[in-house]
Image: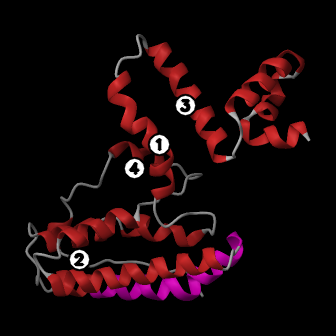
Amino acid sequence: MALKATCRQTPAWLAPVRQGYGAYNRIGADKDITHLNCWAHARREFEKALSNDRQRAEKALVFIQKLYKVEHEARERKLDAAQRKELRLDESLPVINEFAKWMAEEVKQFAVLPKSPIGKAFAYSLNRWDELSAYLYDGILEIDNNLVENAIRPVALGRKNYLFAGSHDAAKRAACIYSFFAICKKHDVNPYKWLKYVFENLMDIRVTELEKLYPQNYKEAIT
């Protein structure tokens, strides 16, 4: 099935809506980067609109629920990236296209007030539709950024406690340390043992082969 998930011919009042953090748009413009938007954030906007327009908000949430049902099925079946992409194209793409068509018809008829919660929910998704649909392109891509947010939550919760790093160089070093330890956590690697291994082998490895010391390669290196 060809990938076609679009939502165009929408009213002019959608155009001024804020597109999100501008830095992401600049980074996403790189041809080697797939710019994704998060369906969990889009869903949140419709949840906010339940008290304003329950009928339409609930219908939108049903569409989104169907997309997450496909992701749940892929996890339950333990599909690889290629299989997950195929499942998404078979089951998620029709839902996304139907969702897009329904939203476009709703706003085209000016059946919603732009500044109402449901109007903002429509605008949020419609202005990000290409990026919301982009996860269909590859099975390694996620439908939302929940995994990332969960990974950085300890840093986000603690940053007020270490607001000042002392200098810009110190801040960069701290960022590197947090990144390495986050990778250790992701790959179930003991940070102390990994650091000990790095210090013991750093002098004997070529500069061009430093990736061999990365946390994600630690378990393979010691076997």
Q: Which amino acid does label 2 sit on?
A: Thr
Spatial distance from mark 3 to mark 4, Cα to Cα?
Answer: 25 Å
Give the mark nearest the N terminus, 1 or 4.
4
Q: Where is residue 135 in the image (x, y as percent from the top left)?
A: 52, 68
x, y (%) of residue 106?
A: 19, 85
Q: Image quadrant for the N terminus?
A: bottom right
Residue 61 visible in the displayed image: yes
Which residue is drawn at the image coordinates 28% and 55% (left, top)? Answer: 19
Residue appearing at x 38%, y 78% in the figure? 64
**Label annotation for residue 178:** 3
Tell me the CA gap for discs 1 and 3.
9 Å
Residue 153 in the image: above or below residue 41: above
Alpha carbon distance from label 4 to label 2: 21 Å
User: Which of the numbered marks, if any, corresponds to residue 88?
Assistant: none
| Residue 94 drawn in magenta | yes
Asked whether the residues under the numbered discs 2 and 3 touch, taking CB atoms below 8 Å apart as contact, a structural biologist would say no
Q: Residue at x 26, y 65 (%)?
A: 124
Mark 4 nearby-residue class (10 Å; few <14, some 14–19, many ≥20): few
Question: Which circle marks residue 25 in the picture?
Answer: 4
Among numbered discs 4 and 2, the one appearing first in the sequence: 2
In the rendered image, residue 22 lying in the magenta stretch gets the answer no
Q: Give the range drawn in magenta.
A: 80-102
Three-letter amino acid code at the position of disc 3: Tyr
Give the amino acid at mark 4: Asn
Q: Mark 1 points at which residue?
A: 152
